[in-house]
Amino acid sequence: MFDIEKSLGFLLAKVHQRGYALFKEELDRYNLTPQQFSLLAFLWQEDTLSQAELAHKTQIDRTTIGGLIDRLEKEQLAERLPHPDDRRAYQICLTDKGKGLEQELCAIARTVTDRFVARLSAAEHETLRTLLEKLRD
């Protein structure tokens, strides 16, 4: 008999749901989702990325990422600018408001992560991160 509750896929899905819910709860007051936060985080690392580059970095499909960028624009956190080398493409840039939220939102992300992994030792946390990176790649 297949024990679904101990299967890797089930456990990963449930852990993802728990982490997502914790993070979403904190981001709700900013009118942001965890996916929108991930776009902002990549733009804080490297401002002015094309929509395709953001889709690749976040591993979010191009259709979905368009809606996420629309909502970041609506919140005045990012803007689309014409791409200088490709008339069909846009560059996504942070606004001053988007840049200004970096420290505050990154502090929240660290706090949520600490709560999320509180039952793990530092070594277990590092091992989990390493294993997840192996599975992702």
Image (tube, rainbow, N blue to C red):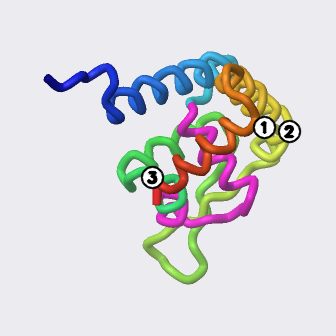
For label 3, the residue is: 135
Residue at 54% x, 48% y: name it.
131
Q: Are marks 2 and 1 in contact (CB under 8 Å)?
A: yes
The N terminus, quarter of image = top left
Quarter of the figure with residue 4? top left
Q: Is residue 49 magenta?
A: yes
Amino acid at circle 1: Cys
Q: Is residue 30 magenta?
A: no
Q: Which residues are magenta?
A: 34-55
For label 1, the residue is: 106
Q: Earlier in the sequence, mark 1 or mark 3?
A: 1
5 left or right, relative to 55: left
Quarter of the figure with residue 50? bottom right
Crowding at mark 3 (Cα within 10 Å: few <14, some 14-19, many 20+): few
Amino acid at circle 2: Gln
Tell me the CA gap for discs 3 and 2. 30 Å
For label 2, the residue is: 103
